[in-house]
Image (spheres, grey):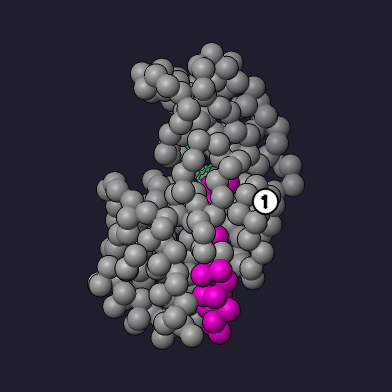
């Protein structure tokens, strides 16, 4: 698997910049999408490739996920010296400690009967949001109807985050773009590399400037300047970056 030539050239230039922030989404990028969110294991070789990038002087690797932080740590099994950002940015400096639990649980209680009525649908309760998953709903019309009814049931104070076979309703207005901008500022980063595959990652791509590299993984409209096919190609990107930084 090779990295597209234009992206390889850009990464070669970025490898000389310091401080350098290399930030990445998890599901669909570091781990292939699967039916069960609890079974989304990292692609073979990606943990090693990421750790090598993070070992370079002046380089910070950040994991920026819609998952709750504890879930992200558990499912990835990663233990490198990373910055961990969960819940689409609501968990920036560490895990949330239950302060949003009341509103979130009320939301989960409201959505539970809608989800229970659709075979294959799944409700995921996260630190700052509730996600309605339809990946395993066999009937596409039933899946679309469930997502529409969850959307309609959401009051205006909630933040809607549509994703891949999922609609998430969040009790904060955090987004990945603001989180990466905050981290860039903290680090004084000269440049940012960001990889993402989903609609919530577009919030990050929209913040990137000409000296940064946004890399969309997979198909779909995007504001990212570069694109790679899938999580296997992502491993090649991190291996190349590790070589360039060595
Ligand atoms: O920001 P990410 O790290 O990409 O997390 C986004 C959501 O990922 C998970 O759901 C997605 O992946 C699942 C496992 O492959 C898949 O079954 C589901 O259809 C996808 O939407 C996770 O469950 C969510 O909490 C994350 O927000």
Magenta residues span: 48-67
Q: Name the residue located 35 percent from the left edge and 68 percent from the top edge.
A: 213
Q: Please tell me whether residue 199 is drawn above or below residue 56 in the rendered image.
A: above
The answer to whether residue 189 is seen in the rendering is no
Q: Is residue 56 magenta?
A: yes
Classify residue 136 as left or right of residue 94.
left
Q: Is residue 237 magenta?
A: no
Q: Name the residue located 50 percent from the left edge and 56 percent from the top edge.
A: 43
Q: Name the residue located 56 percent from the left edge and 50 percent from the top edge.
A: 41
Q: Residue 121, image x and y in percent?
A: 52, 24
Q: Residue 245, image x and y in percent?
A: 46, 83
Residue at the far top: name it.
Answer: 117
Q: Nearer the viewer, residue 8 or 63?
A: 8
The answer to whether residue 9 is seen in the rendering is yes
Q: Name the residue located 64 percent from the left edge and 22 percent from the top edge.
A: 109
Q: Say whether mark 1 is within 8 Å of ligand 1.
A: no
Q: Residue 140 occupies which quadrant of the picture?
A: top left
């Amino acid at each position: 698997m090779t990295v597209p030539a234009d992206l390889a050239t850009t990464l070669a230039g970025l490898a000389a910049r310091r401080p350098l922030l290399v930030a990445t989404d998890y599901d669909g990028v570091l781990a292939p999408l699967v039916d069960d969110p609890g079974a989304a294991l990292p692609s073979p070789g990606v943990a090693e490739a990421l750790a090598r990038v993070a070992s370079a002087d002046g380089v910070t690797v950040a994991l920026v996920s819609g998952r709750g932080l504890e879930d992200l740590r558990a499912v990835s099994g990663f233990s490198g010296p990373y910055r961990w950002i969960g819940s689409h940015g609501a968990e920036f400096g560490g895990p949330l400690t239950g302060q949003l639990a009341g509103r979130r649980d009320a939301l989960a209680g409201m959505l539970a009967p809608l989800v229970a009525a659709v075979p294959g649908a799944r409700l995921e309760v996260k630190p700052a949001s509730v996600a309605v998953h339809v990946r395993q709903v066999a009937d596409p019309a039933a899946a679309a109807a469930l997502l529409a009814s969850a959307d309609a049931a959401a009051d205006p104070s909630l933040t809607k985050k549509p994703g891949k076979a999922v609609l998430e309703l969040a009790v904060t207005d955090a987004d990945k773009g603001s989180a990466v901008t905050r981290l860039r500022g903290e680090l004084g980063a000269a440049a940012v590399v960001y990889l993402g595959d989903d609609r919530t990652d577009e919030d990050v791509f929209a913040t990137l400037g000409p000296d940064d590299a946004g890399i969309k993984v997979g198909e779909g409209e995007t504001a990212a300047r570069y694109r790679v096919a899938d999580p296997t190609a992502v491993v090649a990107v991190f291996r190349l970056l590790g070589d360039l930084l060595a």
